[in-house]
């Protein structure tokens, strides 16, 4: 495996099932909480966050940057993932100038409908009229 390739055991779609800092009951408010790790057009959806993800391999797993929107507020941040001995994905997500949390995810299939693009702040005002 080349050093710039994602490990095969990380590739694919992952269903986020638990976070350490945020309420787990709201994880699926916009649809199943998912993160894709493919190295091409990756996405993240959990709680009210929709984001584009840029994944890079590391020695122990992968790191990522993300940008998107929590509801209509633009946000960005970083994160990392590695595969646990139990086959679940263990990760950390950080919001720039904000919270951070660990998360657990289980292997999933690609959703039948694509994860929507993050809304812009301008969209917030368009929907009110």
Image (spheres, helix red, strand yellow):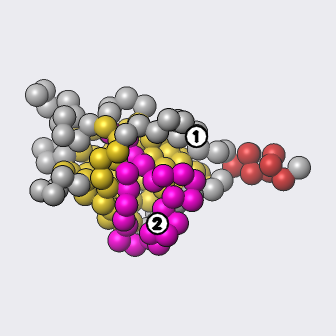
Residue 65 numbered mark, or none = none
- The mark found on residue 98 in the picture is 2
Return the x and y of residue 37 as percentages of the image width and height.
Answer: 33, 39
Q: Tell me which residue sits at (50%, 45%) in the image.
A: 51
Residue 25 place in picture, x, y as percent: 49, 70
Q: Residues within 10 Å of mark 1 (few under 14, many from 20)?
A: few
Quadrant location of residue 59? top left
Q: Is residue 24 magenta?
A: yes
In the picture, the quarter occupied by the N terminus is top left
Q: Is residue 81 visible?
A: yes
- Rendered residue at 23%/41% (across/down): 10
> What are the residue bounds of the magenta stretch?
15-37
* Image position of 89 with respect to 27: above or below: above
Asked if 2 appears above or below 49 in the picture, the reply is: above
| Residue located 26% across and 37% down the image | 11
Residue assigned mark 1: 116
């Amino acid at each position: 495996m080349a050093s710039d390739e994602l490990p095969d055991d990380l590739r694919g779609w992952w269903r986020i099932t638990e976070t350490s800092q945020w309420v787990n009951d709201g994880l699926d408010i916009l649809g199943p909480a998912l993160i894709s790790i493919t190295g091409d057009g990756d996405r993240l959806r959990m709680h009210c966050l929709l984001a584009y993800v840029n994944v890079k391999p590391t020695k122990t797993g992968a790191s990522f940057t993300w940008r998107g929107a929590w509801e209509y507020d633009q946000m960005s941040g970083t994160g990392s993932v590695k595969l646990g001995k139990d086959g679940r994905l263990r990760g950390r997500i950080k919001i720039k100038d904000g919270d951070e949390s660990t998360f657990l995810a289980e292997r999933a299939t690609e959703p039948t409908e694509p994860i929507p693009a993050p809304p812009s702040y301008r969209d917030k005002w368009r929907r009110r009229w």
